[in-house]
Amino acid sequence: MMVVMKSGHSRDEFDGVMRRLEEVGLSGHPIEGAERTVIGVVGIVYPELSDELETMPGVDSTVRISSPYKLCSREFKPADTIVDVKGVKVGAGTVAVIAGPCAVESEEQVMTTARAVKERGASMLRGGAFKPRTSPYSFRGLEEEGLKLLAQARAETGLPVCTEVMSEATVDVVARYADVMQIGTRNAQNFFLLEEVAKVGKPVLLKRGMSASVMDWLLAAEYILAKGNRNVILCERGIRTFETATRNTMDINAIPLVKELSHLPVIADPSHGTGKWHLVEPVCLGMVAAGADGLILEVHPNPDHALSDGAQSLTFDSFERVMQRTATVAHAVGKRMEREAVGATA
Ligand code: PEP
Ligand code: MN
């Protein structure tokens, strides 16, 4: 339910509504619109509540939100959410590119990659320090050592850092270094983890679960918003289908659909979506044409020797080409690349 306040309501009237919601065990999530203040009500709403609230001073009306997800719905907030990561704006009508290795492997690897992606127009650096691997015998990341290397790359390049958090036990250590807390596909419905990560208060990049419907995905995002963190970037990274010719099936439909259903920014991950570096470029173009607010891409100085996801990693040269062609498509659909928009030269 949403409580729409009268224009010109007083602070006391607003506080009165928030207090009443708390008394009946509900939480109120205000948003200040250009004309009106509305309060999203989260919790189990009983039938008489709307009548009760509508008699309170300062309240104009109440409106039911029909979708099961509330705070991330367009019904609750019609205007696009712009997630600001240390000045990098995601969802502001631009294409923000997050690029870097799948896993942080060494100082040399992460520093050369950070410099290369910055030079070619990336807005943020990615890199996994805690890696979810299908086999326990694969390289599972440098852990805190890897986080320190990401912080070193940020200090030199100025690029904010996006890195995955895999467990509740490591939320604090990841939060000490990350600018964006990434939730991977395997944890996309780990609801306790989502809530713990939300509480950190930093922007969260929420990948779509590999077998999550759009509804499942938006309800996962709702867990984060319901804990008071509205800075969520959704990421389509491909889903499991019967098709085995590619690693996953990139769901292009999800981009415009989720943008209709939700105000949150949506980016695309063609690296994990395809699993093949030579498919990354055309899929990037398609995703941006379909309305993606950004891309997250794996880039490695020497993909043949990568400790994870080499087959889908771009070289510096292929990343450069992807950036140039993506910019062409972005311009064709009336957008700019995020770095261009802030006046940086790629
Ligand atoms: C990653 O970004 O490196 C990753 C593991 O992604 P996903 O969770 O989408 O598989
Ligand atoms: Mn990867």
Image (spheres, rainbow, N blue to C red):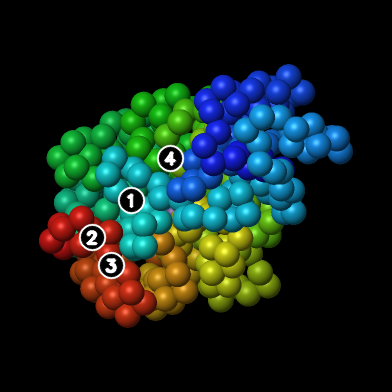
**Mark 2 near mark 1, Cβ–Cβ under 8 Å?**
yes
- Label 2: state its secondary structure: helix
Residue 49 in the image: x percent, y percent? 80, 34
**What amino acid type should be assigned to the residue bearing mark 2?**
Ala
Count neighbours of disc 1 (C-alpha within 10 A) and say few if under 14, some if 14 to 19, many if 20 or more: many
The residues bearing labels 1 and 3 have C-alpha atoms spaced at a distance of 12 Å
**Residue that badge 1 annotates:** 89
The local crowd at label 3, few if under 14, some if 14 to 19, many if 20 or more residues have their Cα within 10 Å, is: many
Query: Decide: marks 4, 3 in contact (CB < 8 A)?
Result: no
In depth, the one of 73 and 182 nearer the eye is: 73
- Percent x, y of residue 97: 32, 58
Tag 1's secondary structure? strand
Which of 260/114 is in front? 260
Residues at marks 4 and 2, CA–CA distance in whole angstroms = 21 Å
Cα distance between the residues tagged 3 and 2: 6 Å
Q: Report the quarter where the N terminus lies.
A: top right
